[in-house]
Amino acid sequence: MRRSLPTILAVLACGLVAACASPGYVRAWRACHEAWVQRIPPDFRQVLTTRERSVEVPDGTETCTTVGGTRRCEKGMRVEWIPYTVAETVDVNARRREPHVRSCAARHCIGAYGNPDCRP
């Protein structure tokens, strides 16, 4: 079954919220997210983003050991971070929408549990 990108991102966002949140907060967040997606709909665009990856490069040192008459040398290495550009699809409205969703969820939790995290 093929899923749309907005559906995949919504599921991913719910998963991230659920990782550290109480079940009550997750329910409140989902309800608020659905409401605010209607008010500020996703606007997916491709943007260029700079990322970094690590590579090991020789650092000019060498460590040699002798075992049983056999000498073995290994070059010393260091990690360098190499920037690269990648095209990503992002929801440009997410930054506007998420504070509203969090505020809405906190209001629901305060009303139901007396605290913004829906902790019993």
Image (spheres, rainbow, N blue to C red):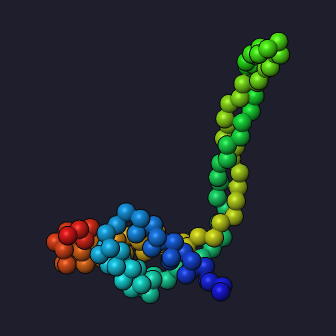
Q: Residue 91: x, y in percent? A: 55, 73
Residue name at image x 72 percent, y 24 percent: 76
83 shown above or below 68:
below
- Asked if one can make out residue 105 in the rendered structure from this viewpoint, the answer is no
Residue lying at the far front in this picture: please name it: 68
Locate the N terminus by quadrant. bottom right
Q: Residue 21: x, y in percent? A: 34, 66
- Asked if one can make out residue 68 in the rendered structure from this viewpoint, the answer is yes
Residue 48: quadrant of the picture? bottom right
Locate the C terminus by quadrant. bottom left
Q: Residue 14: x, y in percent? A: 45, 73
Residue lying at the far right in this picture: please name it: 70
Residue name at image x 63 percent, y 74 percent: 45
Q: Would residue 19 appear left or right of 42 to someone viewing this image?
A: left
The residue lying toward the viewer, choosing from 10 and 42, is 10
24 shown above or below 64:
below
Residue 46: quadrant of the picture? bottom right
The residue lying toward the viewer, choosing from 46 and 66, is 66
Residue name at image x 41 percent, y 65 percent: 19
Q: Would residue 108 appear left or right of 96 to someone viewing this image?
A: left
Residue 111: quadrant of the picture? bottom left
**Number of marks in the image?**
0
Q: Residue 80: x, y in percent? A: 67, 36
Residue name at image x 79 percent, y 14 percent: 68
